[in-house]
Image (tube, rainbow, N blue to C red):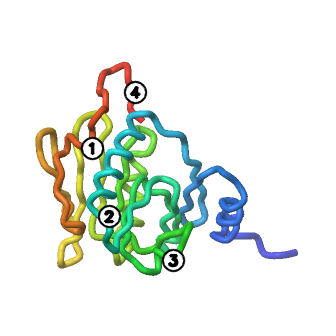
Amino acid sequence: MGLPQENPAYITPEAYLAVEMATDTRNEYLNGEVFAMVGTSSMHNIIVLNLAQALRNHLRGGPCQVFAIDLKLRVETANAYFYPDLMVTCSEADRRSDFIKTEALLVVEVLSPSTALFDRDKKFASYRQLPSLQEYVLVDTEQEGIECYRRADNGEWIMHPYGAGESVTLHGLNLIFPIGMAYQDVDFTPNNPSC
């Protein structure tokens, strides 16, 4: 008789990746647990596209690339694979990897009621372990509001909030844009549920 497993529900990273490569579904992985990705709303999609366009236009022709939604970010020290809404990497190793990036400079998550706590807590705790990461951005879907968490020189993470009418600064990319640009064509009326 063999010894009982400590956690029989634990899924290895290799098993997770095998399933991910064999199907069209997207799941995130954190230390043996798999989290199903749900679809997004129109509002969520519009915000992601607005930000992706601004980032792409700013980075065009340079060494950095922006990726949206469907590429995995590996955080090895957290034993995690995530699908950020947006990420920017300037890494040559990431340029050579088609499906999994490991050295993101910027990660953006557009908040939704079902994922906001996970994005703020477990994902941020994992992302902070990336030595390359300089800024983590959370985008509100209930009002014009962006929180930019920036790594200080001493390694501490400092939150810089931006509200309606303000300009958002992404120091790591040397980019400043009006917050309204992220919300262009977004309807905040009550009968338009957030993502």
Q: CA distance from mark 2 to mark 1?
A: 19 Å
Of the residues under marks 4 and 2, which one precedes in the sequence? 2
**2 vs 1, front mark:** 2
| Marker disc for residue 60 | 2
* Residue placed under numbered mark 4 in the picture: 193
**2 vs 3, front mark:** 2
Looking at the rendering, in which quadrant would you find the C terminus? top left
Residue 4 location (% of width, % of height): 76, 70
* Residue placed under numbered mark 3 in the picture: 96
Q: CA distance from mark 1 to mark 3?
A: 30 Å
Q: Is residue 67 left or right of residue 163?
A: right
Q: CA distance from mark 3 to mark 4?
A: 39 Å
Looking at the rendering, in which quadrant would you find the N terminus? bottom right
**3 vs 4, front mark:** 3
Q: Secondary structure at mark 1?
A: helix
| Residue pictured at 59% horizontal, 59% vertical | 33
188 in relation to 9, above or below: above
| Marker disc for residue 35 | none
Q: Amino acid at mark 1?
A: Ala
Q: Amino acid at mark 2?
A: Arg
**1 vs 4, front mark:** 1
**4 vs 2, front mark:** 2
